[in-house]
Image (cartoon, rainbow, N blue to C red):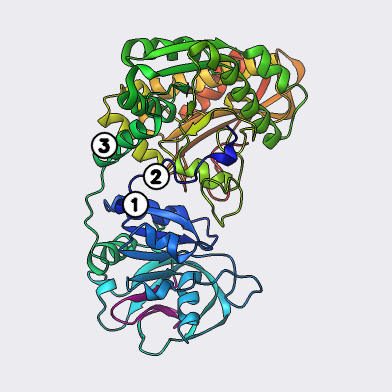
Amino acid sequence: MSRSDVSPTFNRPSVEQAELVVLDYGSQYSLLIARRIRELGVYCELMPATADVSEIAARKPRGIVLSGGPHSVYDDGAAGLPEGLLDLGIPVLGICYGAQLLAHSLGGRVASAPSREFGRAEVLLEGDSPLLTGVESNSVAWMSHTDHIVEVPPGFEVFARSGDGLIAVIGDGALFWGVQFHPEVAHTAFGRDLLRNFALDLCGCAGDWSAASFIENTVDWLRTRIGDRRVICALSGGVDSGVAAALVSRAVGSQLTCVFVDNGLLRLGEAEQCMDVFARHLNMRVVKVDAGEKFLSALDGVVDPEEKRRRIGRSFMEVFEEVAPTLGDADFFAQGTTYPDVIESAGDSKRHSSAAAKIKTHHNVGGLPDTMRLELLDPLSFLFKDEVREVGRSLGLPEEIVDRHPFPGPGLAVRMTGAVTRERLERLRRADHIFISELRAAGLYRHTAQALAVLTSERTVGVLGDARTYEDVLALRAVDTEDWMTADWSRFSHDFLATVSNRIVNEVPGISRVVYDITSKPPATVEWE
């Protein structure tokens, strides 16, 4: 079966749960809006701004959120409101560009500000508004805009202004609301309160969505979708694939066979460790396939990270399609794609359209071949990383899986810049093992969201045993995050970093310099490639 034959809604929970819909106008924060609303126990979904109003209405939402975006309402080709959206009779909240678009569409006026507002800004309240219940005046919000609302639509009021006097919050007191700042980012002190007021009070959402309800709905759907047919599931040993496998196993039991592919791109001892965990904790059939030669051959001479991901994706599917006939003619291929994976790939319009710019292709989203015969099952592709972990705990998965740091499906191939070779892989394995081992020894592993080593393609001069060296530079990367859409670099002590650096330089031949990455996301991504 071709991927083009797969329904874009095949893995969606029942539409009755889509209490809010976020329309994506291209902001890199669009997914974060949905993430924040989910934190309130309100199930919401992201849909493209170009969606037809009938598609939106089919979700039976209690409210609509219009995201920010990079355009002006006056730009040629800028996305407008879906025709008939404001006639649905449900509350609408516009954020940044969404607020400008709402005001412009209802007869207000938008213009370019004398200067761009970017970063933290004061928000000064004017009068009472149910959207701002519990919010103190002189609160801090995060601004990021050039255009702004200069005249509100008929029947609207101004409920807050920025410290520079620009309109910050507007509303008609009932259905339509707009905020010039971003309530979804952590820098807006009262953002969670504002979103709660909108979702629970103005929209009347129940706020009872949970991991348990997700499991029940998804297992029911999987049973119906799969019937008496067979499924193979890609296992990497990480939380995403482990939880996906556990969900499918709960739904169809012995009809599932898990395949663990040792692609030769894993960390030190990882294949053995993963198979041990699967054997002890997952009551399912697991088949191990050694395919290191195939993947290394496919990557020979490749340095472009996108091409690496594409070739790895194709190689994975070739392996699974070769193995499938030996497992009882499987019809489905299950994998652990998550919502952030989908949004960062932002190119598979058959499954999750988005106006956001493509950041990078995830091997299990954009790297799969169009000729793939197996039908995809992505039971987690509407979940955020922390939600996946919560589901995993509810399913009874062990800590070795649930609390494991994320590891990309393409493995160490995308944790080294430049060409992938056996020698470089071994060098990176040893350095990565030292870093993670020291994190565990210092009690820092579980307090860090993700840590990794990156073997760069840079070489620098060094001195070893009074002799000149010209060897590789290794970068260490560790981040802290709550939502995986934004992240900050982890503040380790100098002594800890010195210990790690000294061990790597002394114990790993070929590396003479270690650096620490102190870049947040954005502007950087967590992984280097």
- The reply to whether discs 1 and 2 touch (Cβ–Cβ < 8 Å) is yes
Seen in the picture, residue 421 relative to 517 is either above or below; the reply is above
Q: Which mark is residue 12?
A: 2
Answer with mark 3 or mark 2, whichever residue precedes in sequence: 2
Q: Nearer the viewer, residue 302 or 140?
A: 302
Q: Quadrant of residue 416?
A: top right
**Is 376 inside the magenta-drawn segment?**
no
Answer with mark 3 or mark 1, whichever residue precedes in sequence: 1
Label 2 crowd bin: few (<14), some (14–19), many (20+), radius 10 Å: some
Query: What span is in magenta?
Result: 159-180
Q: Could you say where residue 33 lies in the image, as x and y percent from the top left? A: 41, 57
Name the kind of residue labelled 1 in the image.
Val
In the image, is 25 to the left or to the right of 190?
A: right
The residue wearing badge 1 is: 15
Alpha carbon separation for disc pair 3 and 2:
13 Å
- Image point (65%, 27%), residue name: 314
The residue wearing badge 3 is: 216
Q: What is the secondary structure assignment of the residue under circle 1?
A: helix
In the image, is 205 to the left or to the right of 324?
A: left
- The reply to whether discs 3 and 2 touch (Cβ–Cβ < 8 Å) is no
Q: Nearer the viewer, residue 2 or 154?
A: 2
In the image, is 340 to the left or to the right of 283?
A: right
- Image point (64%, 18%), residue name: 425
Name the kind of residue labelled 2 in the image.
Arg
Regarding residue 96, the answer to whether it shows in the image is: no
Q: Could you say where residue 381 lies in the image, as x and y percent from the top left? A: 44, 40
Q: What is the secondary structure assignment of the residue under circle 3?
A: helix
Regarding residue 371, the answer to whether it shows in the image is: yes
Label 3 crowd bin: few (<14), some (14–19), many (20+), radius 10 Å: few
Alpha carbon separation for disc pair 1 and 2:
8 Å
Q: What is the secondary structure assignment of the residue under circle 2?
A: loop
